[in-house]
């Protein structure tokens, strides 16, 4: 996380909403041999108290006794050229959005697994409307049961929420907007356009 508090003014709820909207991150823990990381889809509860997810049973995190963890959620990011500001004496930088959810992991009982799976698939299928949402009911019982034996449900009980929204807030508004406009003109792709939009919103 960038230490400049200028980039860390977003509220807990704003950061939770960002993590909730992304729905994918890196679960990180400390293992006996060093850091352990797993890239996972997740679902943040409505009250922001926890994030639920599942791991493959063979995952070292699932097999271990680690309880402390952080879930790192990255948003759009991109290089910012000094030329884009339109004023002298600037240096290159990288703008980005990231949220860290810290807390402790709880391994859930097998009776919770189907609910976790159903809620996760419903969350992401909802973004594909008007497509008829996929549900686990479309699977045969035998195949579904076999798949479920391979995974374990968990939740991260969220204790602290940190967010960095480094979007040029340390520049004059007109300079930040100029950089956002240049980013749109020179970079291609959904993530870069989203980053430029966020920069414009905060500096406009």
Image (cartoon, grey):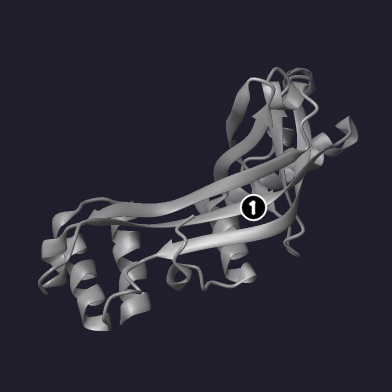
* Crowd class of label 1 (few under 14; some 14 to 19; many from 20; radius 10 Å): many
Q: Position of residue 136 (x, y in %)?
A: 71, 35
Compared with 198, 39 (above or below) is above
Compared with 181, 203 (above or below) is below
Q: Which residue is drawn at 24% across and 68% down?
A: 180
Q: Residue at x 44, y 64 (%)?
A: 165
Q: Where is residue 30 in the image (x, y as percent from the top left)?
A: 66, 32
| The image quarter in which residue 32 lies | top right
Q: Where is the C terminus found, in terms of image quarters?
A: bottom left
Q: Position of residue 158 (x, y in %)?
A: 73, 54
Q: Nearer the viewer, residue 177 or 46?
A: 177
Compared with 203, 12 (above or below) is above
Q: Position of residue 90 (x, y in %)?
A: 17, 66
Q: Nearer the viewer, residue 48 or 2?
A: 2
Q: Which residue is drawn at 50% across and 68% down?
A: 8
Judge from the rendering whether residue 159 lies leftward or rightward of residue 100; answer left or right: right
């Amino acid at each position: 996380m960038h230490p400049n508090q200028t980039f860390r003014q977003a509220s807990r709820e704003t950061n939770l909403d960002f993590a909730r909207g992304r729905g994918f991150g890196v679960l990180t823990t400390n293992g006996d041999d060093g850091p352990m990381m797993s890239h996972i889809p997740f679902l943040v509860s409505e009250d922001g108290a926890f994030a639920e997810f599942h791991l493959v049973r063979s995952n070292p995190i699932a097999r271990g006794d680690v309880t402390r963890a952080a879930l790192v959620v990255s948003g759009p990011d991109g290089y910012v050229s000094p030329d884009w500001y339109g004023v002298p004496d600037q240096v290159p930088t990288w703008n980005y959005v990231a949220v860290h959810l810290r807390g402790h992991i709880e391994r859930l009982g097998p009776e919770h697994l189907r609910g976790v799976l159903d809620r996760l698939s419903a969350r992401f299928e909802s973004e594909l409307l008007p497509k008829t949402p996929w549900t686990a009911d479309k699977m045969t019982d035998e195949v579904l049961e076999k798949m479920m034996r391979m995974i374990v449900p968990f939740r991260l009980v969220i204790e602290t929420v940190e967010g960095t929204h480094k979007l040029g807030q340390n520049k004059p508004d007109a300079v930040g907007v100029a950089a956002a406009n240049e980013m749109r003109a020179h970079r291609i792709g959904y993530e870069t356009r989203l980053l430029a939009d966020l920069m414009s919103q905060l500096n406009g």
